Image (cartoon, grey):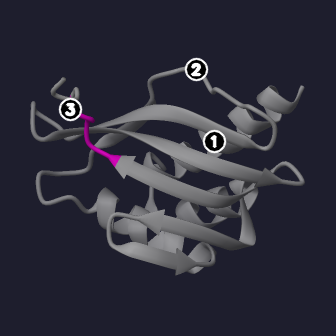
Amino acid sequence: MQEETARSAIDTFISAFNASADIYVTALLSQALTSDVVFWGPLGRSEGIAAVERFVLDIRRHPAGTGTMVRCSAVDMPDEWARYQWVFTTPDGGPRLAGTDVVHLRRSLIDQVIVFAGEIEPSAS
């Protein structure tokens, strides 16, 4: 049950990147995130849905064209934390970015997002 709730919030969050128009982004984020969400992204820490919306809109306006964001793994959820992998691909074979997000849930909504963009290289042992 808890994992299904997390999966639903995560998939709604990801759907904001793929909305048919920018005007739908805020509503989708409001269904997935708490109003005081803390977002740890590539450019540092920010708070609130408006900050996450700016990030999503920036990704949607990628110079290579509007891309597609997909969750490409199961949701792994020990207690109130969850992680999943994602892939962002731009049209016509343009840039592709993959990563892992770690999210914290409070009352069925995401209240913290930590974005790890890019692949982790194997350690040299």
Q: Nearer the viewer, residue 96 or 114?
A: 114
Disc 3 marks which amino acid?
A: Glu
Q: Of the residues tagged 2 and 3, which is closer to the observer?
A: 3
Predominant secondary structure in magenta? loop
Q: Which quadrant would the N terminus be assigned to in this image? A: top right
What's the CA distance linking mark 3 and mark 1? 25 Å
Based on the displayed image, in which of its 4 quarters is residue 99 positioned?
Answer: top left
Which residue is identified by label 2? 74
Disc 1 marks which amino acid?
A: Ile
**Of the numbered discs in the image, which one, if any, rests on residue 99?**
none
Q: Does residue 106 show up magenta in the picture? A: no
Q: What stretch is highlighted in magenta?
A: 117-121
| First reached walking from the N terminus: tag 3 or tag 1 | 1
Which residue is identified by label 1? 10
| First reached walking from the N terminus: tag 1 or tag 2 | 1
**Of the numbered discs in the image, which one, if any, rests on residue 121?**
3
- Horizontal and vertical percent for residue 63? 13, 60
Q: Is mark 2 on a helix, strand or loop?
A: loop
Give the class, few, some or many, for how many residues have Cα within 10 Å of label 1's Cα (few <14, many ≥20).
Answer: many
- Horizontal and vertical percent for residue 120? 27, 35
Vertical placement of residue 112 versus 14, above or below: below
